[in-house]
Image (cartoon, rainbow, N blue to C red):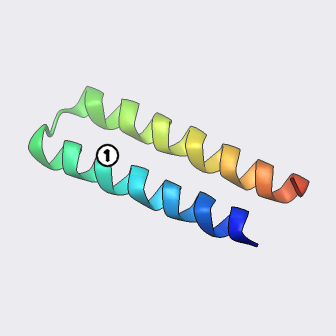
């Protein structure tokens, strides 16, 4: 149970950091990299939690 909470909290912190980064540097190419980074992190969290580890 705590693994899920820590994982969701870490994803939220990553999203906050990337959101702040995009607010200061609003570039289209950076937005693509941020979206890819956040998407990969979210997919990894989802697959890890689904697997049951």
Residue 44 vs residue 38: left or right?
right
Q: Secondary structure at mark 1?
A: helix
Question: At 48% from the left edge and 35% from the top edge, which residue is drawn?
Answer: 36
Mark 1 Cα-neighbour bin, 10 Å: few <14, some 14–19, many ≥20: some
Residue 21 vs residue 44: left or right?
left
Counting the numbered discs, the total is 1
Question: At 89% from the left edge and 52% from the top edge, which residue is drawn?
Answer: 51
Q: Position of residue 24 (x, y in %)?
A: 10, 43
Residue 12 vs residue 30: left or right?
right
Q: Of all residues shown, which one is farthest toward the front?
A: 2
Question: Where is 10 relative to 40, above or below?
Answer: below
Provide the residue designation for mark 1. 18
Q: Position of residue 53 (x, y in %)?
A: 86, 53
Q: Of all residues shown, which one is farthest toward the top?
A: 29
Q: Of all residues shown, which one is farthest toward the bottom?
A: 1
Q: Quarter holding the N terminus?
A: bottom right
Q: Residue 25 occupies which quadrant of the picture?
A: top left
Question: Where is 44 relative to 2, above or below?
Answer: above
Q: Residue 16 occupies which quadrant of the picture?
A: bottom left
Question: Where is 34 relative to 17, above or below?
Answer: above
Q: Of all residues shown, which one is farthest toward the right?
A: 52
Question: At 48% from the left edge and 44% from the top edge, which residue is drawn?
Answer: 38
Residue 14 vs residue 11: left or right?
left
């Amino acid at each position: 149970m705590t693994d899920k909470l820590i994982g969701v909290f870490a994803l939220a912190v990553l999203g906050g950091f990337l959101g702040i980064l995009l607010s200061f540097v609003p570039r289209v190419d950076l937005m693509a990299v941020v979206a890819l980074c956040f998407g990969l992190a979210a997919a990894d969290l989802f697959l890890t939690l689904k697997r049951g580890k």
